[in-house]
Amino acid sequence: MATMTQSLEDYIEAIFVLIRDGGSACVRDVARMLDVKMPSVVKAIHELKKLELATQEPYSSIELTAKGRRLAKMVLGRHTLLCSFLQKLGVSAKTADVDACRMEHILSAETLDKIRIFTEKNK
C-alpha cells in the first residue's frame, strides 16, 4: 500500500493548482511546475491513484478525487498560511514561497494553529 509522502503532497498540490488555475493538469504541466522529469510525475500519479486521491485515463488529464481535492486544499492552505506568515516577518515573496514549501510538511498541527492565530491577529 502506498503512503502519503512529502513529495506526493507536492504533486497533489501542483495538480490542484493547475486544475484550479487552468482547468486541467497534464503530466507535462506538473513536471514543468515542479521542475521534475515526466517519468517522476507518472510514478507519482500511479501512487496517488493507489491512494485513491487521483484518477487518469491513458493520455488524458489528471483528475483529483473528492478525497484528493480535500487533501490538496489542506496542503495548499498550509502553504498559503506559511507564505503569509513569512512575508509578515519581512521575508521576500520568492523566498517565503520556497521556505513555505519546505516547512509545510514538517510543522505540527499545533504549530500551524499558533501561526494561523498569530497571522490573523496581525493582519
Image: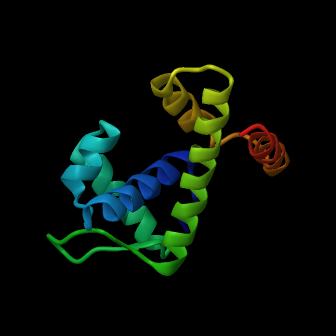
Please state the horizontal and vertical placement of residue 71, each as a whole percent of the image.
57, 65
Give the vertical position of 112 relative to 52 (above or below).
Answer: above
Horizontal side of 95 relative to 111 (left or right) equals left
Q: Nearer the viewer, residue 42 or 20?
A: 20
- Residue furthest toward the front? 123
Quarter of the image that includes the N terminus? bottom right
User: Would residue 96 appear left or right of 81 to someone viewing this image?
Assistant: left
Residue under the image location 39 percent in, 56 percent down: 17
Residue farthest to the left, as pictured: 59
Residue placed at 24% from the left, 42% from the top? Answer: 32
- Among the 4 quarters of the image, the one containing residue 35: top left
Residue at the image point whose x is 79% and y is 51% from the top = 109
Q: Quadrant of residue 83?
A: top right
Q: How many marks?
A: 0
Among the 4 quarters of the image, the one containing residue 103: top right
- Along the horizontal axis of the image, is 60 left or right of 121? left
Q: Position of residue 75 (x, y in %)?
A: 58, 54
Q: Can you give x and y, in whole percent of width and height, for residue 48 in the image?
A: 44, 65
Decide: is 52 above or below 37: below
Protein image colouring: rainbow
Dividing the image into 4 quarters, which one contains the C terminus? top right
